[in-house]
Image (cartoon, rainbow, N blue to C red):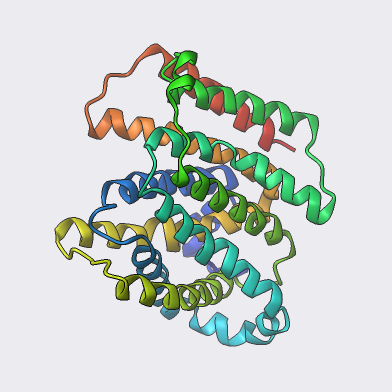
Amino acid sequence: MIAEHPPQPRTLLVWFNNQPYLLLSLTTLFWAGNMVLGRYVSGHVPPVTMACVRWIGAFFLLLPFAWPHLRRDWPALIAHWPLMLTLAFTGFAANTVLAYWGLQYTQALNGLLIQSAGPLCVALWTLILFGVRLTLAQLLGIAASLAGVLIIILRGDVTALASIQINKGDAMLAAALLIFGIYSALMLRQPVTHPLSLIAFTTGCGALMTIPLNIWELSSGATLILDMLTLVTLIYIIIFPSALAYLFFNRGIALIGPNRAAPFFHMMPVFGSAMAIVFLGEKPELFHLVGYALVLAGVFIASRR
């Protein structure tokens, strides 16, 4: 994202690039917006088309900035091609197609509950792949933030769990989250390259992987409604939850590791409910404050050394 030894005018950018908590908080803010918009435009943009446009757009947005680094790092990227293709598939192609597909069939409540399992998925894969165990602090932090998420989503009413119905959309979102957990864990083994090289290569490969499925989707009768809502949505998902969020997420993992970064998944329902308060005029309640406090405390505990 930045040069290793930038000139003095970039001091603020250097500082920003070394703030993992800020980077990961912005990542989850952008991803929360992606979930809300993905559900809202489910009748306008077919799911595979959204994933395909998202990664093609992100690739061409990043390419001018990444090109000099990509040329320099190309030998290292090609030398690790099995890992790079796996990162492209798990982090970009498969998980986004399944997530957008799932949002066609499920409630926002279900989706937010499933997203809350993100830290557990990351912990599972880091344990299976590399034998990295959760520390006691990470386990306690995940438990605390998960409790806060449940309080926010259920609006302080535990009996609301009984009204949740599981459907195929839930299964798709759960599969997407499980696949993304592999991406998060494998980032521990990323080759030593410039961040822009890594993100440009993986977004490009991820976009190529979605094209055949996108052709099938459109040939089967799915239609894209090209209106202002669609254009604004596509512009948002290309810039914020794609290009910027993945740069920030990758950098956050590089700074503090996947297990300490994973509890930030719990910030997504917090940001989602905050968006509902700000943009939809919902009234803040006591359960919001209690839930926010637990989530923030859990993230703080789990992400400390």
Which residue lies at the image location 56% right of the left edge and 61% below the top edge? Answer: 91
Q: In the rendering, at what x and y percent does residue 229 appear? A: 18, 55
Q: Is residue 158 left or right of residue 235?
A: right
Visible residue check, residue 218: yes
Which residue lies at the image location 17% right of the left edge and 65% below the top edge? Answer: 226
The vertical placement of 205 against 40, above or below, is below
The vertical placement of 203 against 305, above or below, is below
Q: Is residue 138 left or right of residue 18?
A: right
The total number of labels drawn is: 0
Visible residue check, residue 5: no
The vertical placement of 290 against 279, above or below, is above
Q: Is residue 274 left or right of residue 282?
A: right
Which residue lies at the image location 39% right of the left edge and 46% below the top edge? Answer: 35
Which residue lies at the image location 52% right of the left edge and 52% below the top edge? Answer: 16
Say which quarter of the image contains residue 279: top left
Q: Is residue 128 left or right of residue 68?
A: right
Q: In the rendering, at what x and y percent does residue 304 appear? A: 70, 35
Give the position of the C terminus as an image quadrant: top right
Farthest residue in the right direction?
Answer: 131
Farthest residue in the left direction?
Answer: 227
